[in-house]
Amino acid sequence: MFRKNIRDFYSLTTHEATPELLAEYGLSSEFINSDIRTYANFGAADITGFEWSIRHQLNFLPRWGRGLSLFANGTHLKLSGPNQDDFDNFSRQNINWGISFVRPKFQVKVNVAMAKEVKLNRVAVSANVLPDMFRYVAPQTLVDLSFEYQFSKRISLYSSIRNALQDDKHTLLMGAFTPEHARISVSQRAGSLVTLGIKGVF
């Protein structure tokens, strides 16, 4: 368990362009009906949470299963405080787990990363954006695979697949009353990244 008290963090502020502010920033009066957005150190927020991790070698298996191991770890956070909505790039929960099989000449690994939604930033009010709307990254589950085979002490073949299940990335734009069908702002289909190569040590 832990608790972090964060003060004067870096965040975006928006102010109405008054004649005094225009003079302070050296801007002409043509911007009098505009908003001035700038970054500043301000605010207070508290993060409480806990982290956990386990790793286990499956030594009880028969000889064919020796070298098989499991791991899992997680981070769980809660954000509070008067300026919690001004805290950007915040993820409430991340869980990673996987399995590996390692033998003298080869190894195979499967890693799974599961993330809750990530709160990115507040969105400026406009004709299409209501007050107190935020941009998020939707929950994602990414599966990575890797393999390596050693022909000799100096030569080995390796391969990896990032995002093997081709999970899409969705950016959400929503507030307290945004219906679910209207939340997706951007969808990205990155596919899988496949790497294949030979490593040599000389």
Image: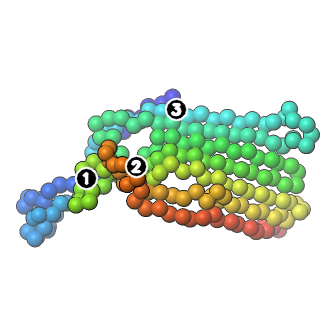
Front position in the image: 114 or 109: 114
Which of label 2 and label 3 is nearer to you? 2
Q: Residues within 10 Å of mark 2 (few under 14, many from 20)?
A: few
Left or right of 168 in this view: 99: right
**Residue matched to label 1:** 130
Q: What is the x, y in percent for residue 168?
A: 54, 59
Amino acid bearing label 3 = Phe
**Residue matched to label 2:** 180
Q: What is the x, y in percent for residue 171?
A: 44, 57
Residue at image point 36% right, 35% down:
80
Front position in the image: 141 or 120: 141
The secondary element bearing badge 3 is classed as strand
Estimate the spatial distance between the alpha carbons at disc 1 and disc 2, rounded to whole Å.
16 Å
Could you tell which of marks 2 and 3 lies nearer the N-terminus? 3
**Residue matched to label 3:** 50
Estimate the spatial distance between the alpha carbons at disc 3 and disc 1, rounded to whole Å.
34 Å
Q: What is the x, y in percent for residue 139?
A: 50, 48
Amino acid bearing label 1 = Leu
Could you tell which of marks 1 and 2 lies nearer the N-terminus? 1
Residue 12 visible from this viewpoint:
yes
Q: What is the x, y in percent for residue 21?
A: 12, 59
Front position in the image: 165 or 49: 165
The secondary element bearing badge 2 is classed as helix
Could you tell which of marks 3 and 1 lies nearer the N-terminus? 3
Tell me the tag on residue 171.
none
Left or right of 92 in this view: 86: left
Residue 10 visible from this viewpoint:
no
Amino acid bearing label 2 = Glu
Write down the quadrant of residue 73 in the picture.
Answer: top right
